[in-house]
Image: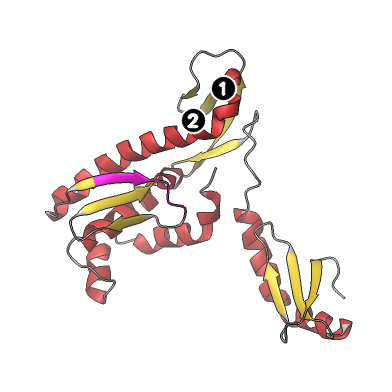
Amino acid sequence: MEQSIISQVIRTKRRTLVLQIMPDASLIIRAPARASEGTIRQAVQNKMSWILKKQRTARETFRPPVKFVDGEEFLYLGERRKLLVVPGASVPLVFNEKEFLLSGTHLPEARRLFEEWYKEKAFEIIRDRIKQYAERTGLEYTKISVTSARKRWGSCSLKGRLNFTWRLVMTPLAVVDYVIVHELVHLDEHNHSSRFWQKVRILLPNYLQAKRWLKNNHLLLNL
């Protein structure tokens, strides 16, 4: 059996055999209780190309649990910025355009401080970008809100309220623009018809690249 790439074989009462690539790139085999070693080995061999491709993608996007220690990296507008813990610093958290400086005395509340910082930056950046695109399109919105949503990057209500997750500020600016334009166009087109996508394309000809980045890297957008 290809033991070198299999992390665990779980036998259950299920009738079918399933290969599952975990976020950390490990391979879990869920197999029927009576499945032979040969059957499992053959299943792995048959899916080897798929397994290796999925594991490569997982390794590129996997992010271990955040520990808030010196040298750890945090995404800001698509760039990885290192964290420096500064003993006795009076200001809890500062970003100097190169790295994050976190006061050692505020380590217990590091996660909250980072989230608040991201929320503040997200609102500033999204507000300014929306204004630019709204002026170009003539579309009008009523309110902008920044949320803590983990998977819903943005939304648009029938009353013109636009919501965006603060996690967007971790992505490249082109991705921020894509989500903004996506929701702005929804003010005019409340669907995902070909007409909707054509309007998105007019504003962002390369929107598919940003959409693909979000699909491939969404697991990185967490604290």
Specify the label residue 172 is tagged with. Answer: none
- Colour logic: secondary structure
Q: Position of residue 212 (x, y in %)?
A: 45, 62
Q: Residue at x 29, y 53 (%)?
A: 180
Q: Position of residue 79 (x, y in %)?
A: 50, 41
Residue at the left extreme, as displayed: 138
Q: Is residue 44 left or right of residue 91?
A: right
- Residue linked to disc 2: 113
Which secondary structure lies at badge 2? helix
Q: Is residue 115 left or right of residue 160?
A: right
Determine crowd level at label 1: few under 14, some 14-19, many 20+ residues with C-alpha closer than 10 A. Answer: some
Q: Residue at x 35, y 61 (%)?
A: 207
Front one among 96 and 86: 86
- Does the image show residue 154? yes
Q: Which residues are magenta?
A: 144-150
Front one among 118 and 10: 10
Q: Are marks 1 and 2 in contact (CB under 8 Å)?
A: yes
Front one among 24 and 11: 11
Amino acid type at mark 1: His
Q: Could you give the CA–CA distance between mark 1 and mark 2, rounded to whole angstroms?
A: 9 Å
- Residue linked to disc 1: 106
